[in-house]
């Protein structure tokens, strides 16, 4: 209480309010008259002044409280909106991933339906070699599932590699994008404009252009861009007729002999997740 009354202005305000109230009460006690007594006028003025002094800070406090409440409400709304945006972003990423997975599965179903001469064992890629010069993936199927070494592996719409190591429950697959010199090369062929086939082997992969390189081409044939490339079956390791991709570019020597053919692969080699291991019936 001592601290409260130490404020002189507040004490003076309270005293004025008491005096004003007393004057009003006294003037009313004098009885009804035609004119307002001077004492009552003075009391009314004092009471009005005191009321304004008290009302201004009270209004200010009310305004401040309202602003604080609005600020808190705005902050909470922003937090809710931020959380909603995060959820939408996560949902969008998940939907994109599911769409890609659905696309791959549809391609696999279409591939399986088109390859009636083969027994296809579905497999999932578990790991991929981090090496930039050796594209090896490990799949979750092995000898227990009938998988054998050198069996071709397909994904999307075409060939992606072959089994190079078959274990009991897993297998290692060497992709056709492997640029290692010791990699097993596929014998492939493409039909020329005259109806005959041009043979060669996969000699490399250009990661920048996403193109398979068909080398050791010796036939002097005119090959059209867009022609389909398939496995030739030469060498007896890989069955004939597996789809590899389409011709993207043909390079020739000075004598007009085709020496290198660039192929756009049918499968997406940079993102192999679900595959089929093929066995000719």
Image: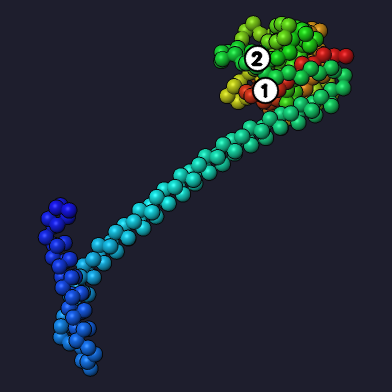
Q: Residue at x 67, y 22 (%)?
A: 273
Residue in the foreground of this view, choosing between 209 and 178 = 178
In the picture, measured across the screen, residue 114 lies left or right of residue 104, that is right
Q: Residue at x 68, y 30 (%)?
A: 101
Residue in the foreground of this view, choosing between 21 and 30 = 30
Q: Residue at x 72, y 9 (%)?
A: 169
Q: Residues within 10 Å of mark 2 (few under 14, many from 20)?
A: many
Instruction: Residue 57: name its quadrant.
Output: bottom left
Q: Which mark is residue 241?
A: none
Q: Position of residue 87 (x, y in %)?
A: 55, 40
Instruction: Residue 211: name its quadrant.
Output: top right
Lower position in the chain sequence, tag 1 or tag 2: 2
Please name the residue that numbered disc 2 is placed on.
137
Q: Residue at x 17, y 66 (%)?
A: 14
Q: Which mark is residue 273?
A: 1
Q: Quadrant of the C terminus?
A: top right
Q: Position of residue 3 (x, y in %)?
A: 15, 52
Element under disc 1: loop
Instruction: Residue 112: name its quadrant.
Output: top right
Element under disc 2: strand
Q: Are discs 1 and 2 less than 8 Å apart at CB?
A: no
């Amino acid at each position: 209480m001592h601290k409260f009354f130490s404020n002189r202005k507040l004490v003076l305000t309270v005293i004025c309010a008491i005096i004003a109230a007393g004057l009003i009460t006294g003037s009313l006690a004098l009885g009804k008259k035609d004119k307002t007594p001077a004492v009552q006028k003075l009391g009314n003025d004092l009471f009005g002044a005191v009321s304004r002094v008290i009302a201004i800070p009270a209004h200010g406090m009310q305004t401040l409280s309202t602003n604080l409440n609005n600020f808190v409400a705005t902050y909470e709304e922003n937090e809710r909106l931020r959380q909603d945006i995060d959820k939408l972003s996560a949902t969008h990423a998940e939907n994109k991933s599911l769409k890609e997975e659905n696309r791959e599965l549809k391609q696999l179903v279409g591939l399986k339906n088109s390859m009636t001469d083969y027994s296809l064992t579905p497999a999932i890629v578990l790991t991929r070699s981090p090496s930039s010069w050796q594209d090896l993936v490990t799949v979750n199927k092995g000898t227990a599932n009938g998988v054998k070494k050198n069996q071709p592996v397909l994904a999307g719409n075409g060939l992606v590699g072959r089994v190079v190591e078959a274990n009991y429950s897993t297998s290692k697959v060497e992709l056709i994008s492997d640029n290692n010199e010791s990699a097993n090369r596929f014998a492939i062929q493409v039909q020329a404009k005259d109806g005959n086939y041009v043979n060669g082997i996969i000699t490399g992969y250009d990661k920048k252009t996403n193109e398979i390189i068909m080398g050791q081409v010796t036939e002097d044939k005119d090959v059209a861009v867009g022609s389909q490339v398939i496995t030739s079956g030469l060498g007896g390791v890989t069955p004939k007729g597996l789809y590899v991709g389409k011709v993207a570019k043909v390079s020739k020597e000075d004598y007009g002999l085709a020496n290198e053919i660039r192929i756009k692969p049918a499968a997406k080699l940079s993102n192999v997740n679900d595959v089929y291991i093929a066995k000719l019936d």
